[in-house]
Image (cartoon, rainbow, N blue to C red):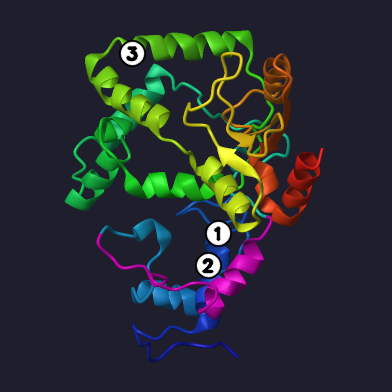
Amino acid sequence: MKRTITTVNSNIIMTEILYELICMTFQKGNTFGRLNLGHEVSEEIRELIRRKVIMHPKSFKKGLTPWSKGLTKETDERLLRFSIEMKGKHFSPATEFKKGEKIRLGAHQTAESRLKMSLHQTGKIMSLKTRKLISKNNPRYWLGKKRPDIAELMRETQKGNHHRLGSHCTKHTKKLMSNNLKERWKLPSYREKQIPLILKGLLKRPTSLETSFINLSYENELPVKYVGNGSIIINGANPDFICTDGRKLLIEVACRFRHPRNYAKQRYKIFSKDGYKTLVVWKSEFKNKNKLLKKVRKFLMM
């Protein structure tokens, strides 16, 4: 028996009819306004198109609100069914993702492509919000400006990240870094900013690492005294701590980020010329204070 539509509500459309229209329009190889040959269109959909309750893809006009606006496949059964139906299908072989195919990152567009893109954007008026977003994404906008949000994000990202420890730069990289610093040092504004910071760092004694060892020695009554402020010079070098009972024992605290890998050997060689024995404590050892304390006490008992 032939079915006909007598009353159509423009605001309420049957799920089955919409789903049939979507599948009819978006089948593989289809484009808007061109239906697959041999596909039968039901009388219900023909009637809806004639009454202009639902729009044919080809007759879509600017300003009309799509029926699916604000809907997702999590909240709407029609979109969920459409998503399942279209999974694994492609509109064109040219747009199909191929495993192993290289993405054209950094590829240059031809003059013809650039002209087409320019003509496509000509006459379009962007909102003030869009223009501001485009402007803020331009690196030149942030030239000379501080970004606390990005700085905080970088700090959080780099926490506990020690993948560069012990790594060596190539001669070419070292040369580039050196030339870059030399060029920056020629700028008066850069020098004026860096010199006070360098002096402040040199004059700041004790350092945070030295302070940690001072607190450790004070809490555990270790017979050592801080001399890293330049009060004692041995063979042209200034040790960090010296034994207070007259024995020639020295303790150095060091950080692998600031000191070379052979720092311990260098200090042994310098202080041994005057008969001193040296213990080098690295920053990473402070994570296990009990183990560090045993190591220091064993050295002081020599």
Q: Position of residue 181 (x, y in %)?
A: 41, 14
Give the residue type that dot 2 points to: Ile
Q: Nearer the viewer, mark 3 or mark 1?
A: 3
Q: Does residue 17 sit above or below 209 in this rendering? A: below
Is residue 278 in view?
A: yes
Q: Nearer the viewer, mark 3 or mark 2?
A: 3
Disc on res. 185: 3
Is residue 42 in view?
A: no
Give the residue type that dot 1 points to: Phe
What secondary structure is marked by label 1? loop
Residue neighbourhood size for the residue with mark 3, other residues' Cα within 10 Å, grouped as few (<14), some (14–19), many (≥20): some
- The residue nearer to you, when weighing 157 against 25, is 157
Question: Which of the two discs, 3 and 2, labels the residue nearer the N terminus?
Answer: 2
Would you say 129 lies left or right of 210 here? Answer: left
Residue numbers of the magenta segment:
63-88
Would you say 297 lies left or right of 4 here? Answer: right
Q: Which residue position is annotated with label 1? A: 26
Disc on res. 154: none
